[in-house]
Amino acid sequence: MNVELKEGFKQVCVLEGILMGKSTPKEFEDLIFEKFETRIQFLEEVETNPDIEDGLPVPDTGGRHDIFFAVHSEDVMKFSVIRLSFRIRWIEDVLAKGNYHSPIYPARIFDYCTWNEENIDRKVA
């Protein structure tokens, strides 16, 4: 089940290949605020499924840990450019047709999308 977004938090971002380890969601939120002066809501860490090719899992794929978090609506504009230097992407761009080649995320992840609906490639795991 997806985490419910708090009031004022709408734009979901993906930071690929990051393990939370022993860090807490609060520590992650504080780190992002410290680095970017941006308020976020940590949502979840998702382990990716393997890529699928010809209906079969591709060996040695999957198992990557991605962090999902939402940015406060008032901070989206100032965060939108600086995030790119840190490979933080809008979820809609991650899941867009042409970018999303395999159902590596659970189908429920698509419910975090809030715009660009016509370009989302709704492949499901």
Image (spheres, grey):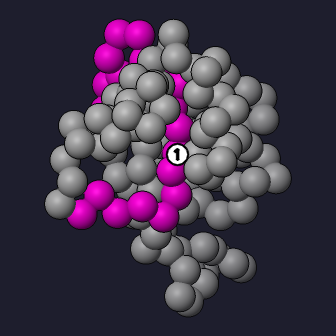
The correct choice, above or below, for 70 with respect to 52 in the image is above
Query: Dot 1: what SS?
Result: strand
Q: How crowded is mark 1: few (under 14 residues within 10 Å), some or many (20 or more)?
A: many
Q: Where is residue 103 in the image (x, y as percent from the top left)?
A: 59, 60
Which of 106/95 is in front?
A: 95
Residue 20 inside the magenta-drawn segment: yes
Which residue type does callout 1 highlight? Answer: Val
Which residue is farthest front?
Answer: 34
The correct choice, above or below, for 40 with respect to 74 in the image is below
In which quarter of the view is residue 115 placed?
A: top right
Residue 92 seen in render = no
The quarter of the picture where the N terminus appears is top left
Residue 15 inside the magenta-drawn segment: yes
Which residue is farthest bottom?
Answer: 59
Residue at horizontal 60%, vertical 73%? 51
Q: Name the residue under label 1.
A: 14
Name the magenta segment's main secondary structure: loop
Which of 15/60 is in front?
A: 15
The correct choice, above or below, for 56 with respect to 107 in the image is below
Which residue is farthest right?
Answer: 98
Task: Please give left or right for residue 97 compared with residue 59 in the image.
Answer: right
Q: Position of residue 17 (x, y in %)?
A: 48, 64
Task: Please give left or right for residue 54 compared with residue 5 in the image.
Answer: right
What segment is highlighted magenta in the picture? Answer: 1-21
- The number of numbered badges drawn on the structure is 1
Residue 68 seen in render = yes
Which of 118/21 is in front?
A: 21
Residue at horizontal 32%, vertical 25%? 4
Q: Position of residue 64 (x, y in %)?
A: 46, 69
Q: Position of residue 26 (x, y in %)?
A: 21, 37
Residue at horizontal 69%, vertical 78%? 53
The correct choice, above or below, for 112 with respect to 88 in the image is above
